[in-house]
């Protein structure tokens, strides 16, 4: 067997100690696809942000840390093992930032004699600060460390039947409990990232109802893809339009970010009479700081303090059997596409 699978997620500090959180934040925020300003300004801004936020972030990580370490990494390891059993070939896990590193994963694949690898970025939606940076990092490492390694790349799967079925199946027990309203909370992005990823430079956030007007830009538009996921999920499970809505979480800085903002929506919904709120975070395939602490702890408190009575959060896909099966189907389809074309298939990168 000379084929393998590489799963890549965002990353996590090695521990909730301030020094490790500081190291993680430095690496994450210095990525030009995350903070897209000139290097010197980025270095100054990151220094200030890390100085101000490292202790606060470390305290947040301590609240969600497990005996197995970071939830994101621990869940990733379980998914890695389960998927390897499903597909019968090596599966490597890497993080874009910190450990396990992309470099170590690629080097291990080479040592094992792997000649072809299928990369599955663990981000259903295209964003320069998640999907794109993970793909470009893997490409760069392979070019430097293993130029003979053939790479195929899973395109964004925000509307893929397997991904949606896994979301619906994992959410089913919570939907059955009853609720007044379902809030889809996606990770936020600066509006400038949306505009910059638009290959036409004329559509995203420039045309009225831009996400509803067909355009080539949608192939790279995070906002459009998030809305597609929410609409498809609601249709699949039969939730009427007046009982669900979309918001975006995790803002950083003062610039314009995608809205509405989750923290404000939680207060608004409680004030509008929503008493039993259900929250799902489809942009995250594994529970992490943003889901467990930002939504599960701070978000819950905000909603209840604003007058809500019941706050239920649907866990991420994590290691749900339907999610493992969806990942396995991606691998099978990649094999079929490669066999038909005689070469690996890959996703198209957005313009830099």
Image (cartoon, helix red, strand yellow):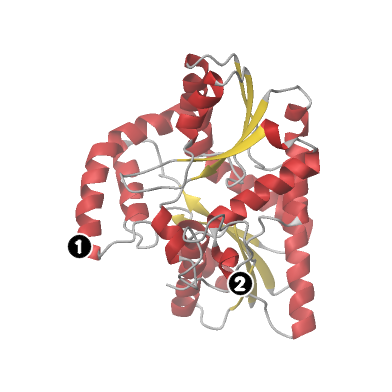
Residue plotted at (49% across, 35% down) = 262
Residue plotted at (30% across, 51% down) = 26
Quadrant (top left/top right/bottom left/bottom right) for the N terminus:
bottom right
Quadrant (top left/top right/bottom left/bottom right) for the C terminus:
bottom left
Q: Which residue in the rendered view is the most extreme toward the bottom? A: 342
In the rendered structure, find residue 171 and report the number of the disc placed on it. Answer: none
In the rendered structure, find residue 347 and report the number of the disc placed on it. Answer: 2
Q: Is residue 211 left or right of residue 34?
A: right
Residue plotted at (66% across, 27% down) = 181
* Residue 184 image point, x, y percent: 61, 38
Residue plotted at (54% across, 56% down) = 222
Front position in the image: 297 or 299: 299
* Residue 135 image point, x, y percent: 52, 67
* Residue 144 image point, x, y percent: 44, 78
Q: Is residue 333 left or right of residue 45?
A: right
Q: Name the element at disc 1.
A: helix
Name the residue carrying label 1.
40
**Separation (CA) of disc 1 from disc 2:** 32 Å
Can you see residue 124? no
In this rendering, the answer to whether 293 lies above or below 207 is above
Of labels 1 and 2, earlier in sequence is: 1
Front position in the image: 213 or 228: 213
Q: Name the element at disc 2.
A: loop
Front position in the image: 247 or 101: 247
In this rendering, the answer to whether 231 lies above or below 143 is above
Q: Is residue 46 left or right of residue 205?
A: left
Within 10 Å of disc 2 (Cα), the crowding (few <14, some 14-19, many 20+) is few
Can you see residue 205? yes
Q: Is residue 62 left or right of residue 146?
A: left
Within 10 Å of disc 1 (Cα), the crowding (few <14, some 14-19, many 20+) is few
């Amino acid at each position: 067997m000379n084929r393998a699978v590489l799963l890549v997620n965002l990353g996590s500090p090695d521990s909730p100690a301030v020094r490790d959180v500081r190291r993680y934040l430095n690496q994450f925020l210095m990525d030009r696809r995350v903070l897209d300003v000139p290097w010197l300004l980025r270095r100054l801004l990151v220094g200030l942000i890390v100085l101000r936020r490292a202790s606060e972030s470390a305290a947040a990580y301590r609240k969600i840390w497990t005996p197995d370490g970071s939830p994101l990494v621990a869940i990733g390891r379980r998914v890695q093992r389960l998927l390897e059993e499903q597909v019968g070939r090596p599966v490597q896990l890497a993080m874009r930032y910190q450990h396990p590193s992309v470099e170590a994963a690629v080097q291990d694949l080479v040592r094992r004699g792997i000649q072809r690898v299928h990369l599955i970025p663990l981000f259903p939606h295209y964003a320069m600060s998640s999907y794109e940076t993970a793909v470009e990092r893997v490409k760069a490492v392979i070019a430097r460390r293993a130029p003979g390694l053939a790479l195929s790349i899973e395109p964004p799967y925000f509307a893929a039947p397997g991904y949606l079925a896994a979301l619906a199946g994992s959410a089913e027990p919570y939907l059955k409990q009853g609720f007044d309203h379902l809030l889809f909370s996606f990770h936020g992005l600066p509006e400038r990232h949306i505009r910059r990823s638009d290959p036409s430079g004329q559509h995203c956030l420039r045309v009225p109802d831009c996400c509803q007007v067909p355009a080539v830009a949608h192939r790279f538009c995070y906002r459009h893809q998030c809305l597609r996921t929410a609409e498809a999920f609601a249709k699949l499970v039969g939730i009427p339009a007046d009982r669900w809505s979309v918001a975006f979480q995790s803002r950083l800085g003062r610039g314009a970010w995608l809205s509405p903002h989750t923290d404000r929506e939680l207060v608004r919904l409680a004030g509008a009479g929503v008493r039993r709120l259900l929250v799902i975070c489809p942009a995250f395939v594994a529970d992490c700081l943003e889901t467990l602490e930002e939504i599960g702890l701070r978000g819950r408190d905000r909603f209840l303090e604003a007058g809500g009575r019941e706050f239920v959060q649907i866990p991420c896909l994590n290691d749900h059997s339907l999610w493992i099966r969806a990942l396995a189907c991606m691998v099978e389809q990649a094999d079929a596409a490669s066999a038909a074309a005689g070469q690996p298939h890959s996703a198209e990168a957005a313009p830099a």
